[in-house]
Amino acid sequence: IDFFNQGLYYFRITLYNEKDNERYFARPYQIIQTGGKTEEDKKFVIAPGRINEDLSAFCTSTMLVRYSEQEINLNEYCIFRTEIDVGVNYLDTRFFMDVELLFSDLKDLEQTPQMIKEHSHNIETDVAFEQV
């Protein structure tokens, strides 16, 4: 994905199924890192991936994007749990995944990214993000 603005980015992912026009969200419960991040990748990861219990969402690591053609390998994923009613055709239950990209402009930050990385306990509440 190409990002054209310098700033902080992360993906927020939810998984759900629908029944009778109602959404039933799966609960994320385990984040898994595959492989390691390079030293270059680590410089641009501001906060680790996390689970947002209130939104039943997996939030990837928050990344600092500084220039075009920059690549950051997150190498992380999340396992979700859900329950469905066992009935006729329950194996045909369709699941949907929403992936939202969230962004915070660097010019609006009062702290440097390094300060945020060192002192922020909850990046989602300490920094204002908007959906892209």
Image (cartoon, rainbow, N blue to C red):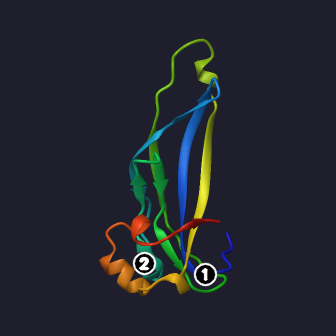
Q: Nearer the viewer, residue 120 or 108?
A: 108
Report x, y in % for residue 100.
60, 57
Q: Which residue is mark 2?
A: 42
Q: Specify which label sits upstream in the sequence, 1 or 2.
A: 2
For the C terminus, the quadrant is: bottom right
Query: Going by the image, does 115 lie left or right of 131?
Result: left
Amino acid at pointer 1: Gln
Residue appearing at x 45%, y 72% in the figure: 127
Query: Going by the image, does 8 lie left or right of 18?
Result: left
Give SS at disc 1. Answer: loop
Q: Which residue is mark 1?
A: 70
Real-space CA distance between mark 1 and mark 2, rounded to the nearest whole angstrom: 13 Å
Vertical order, 51 against 6 (above or below): above
10 Å crowding of disc 1: few (<14), some (14-19), many (20+): few
Report x, y in % for residue 14.
54, 47
Vertical order, 86 against 131 (above or below): above
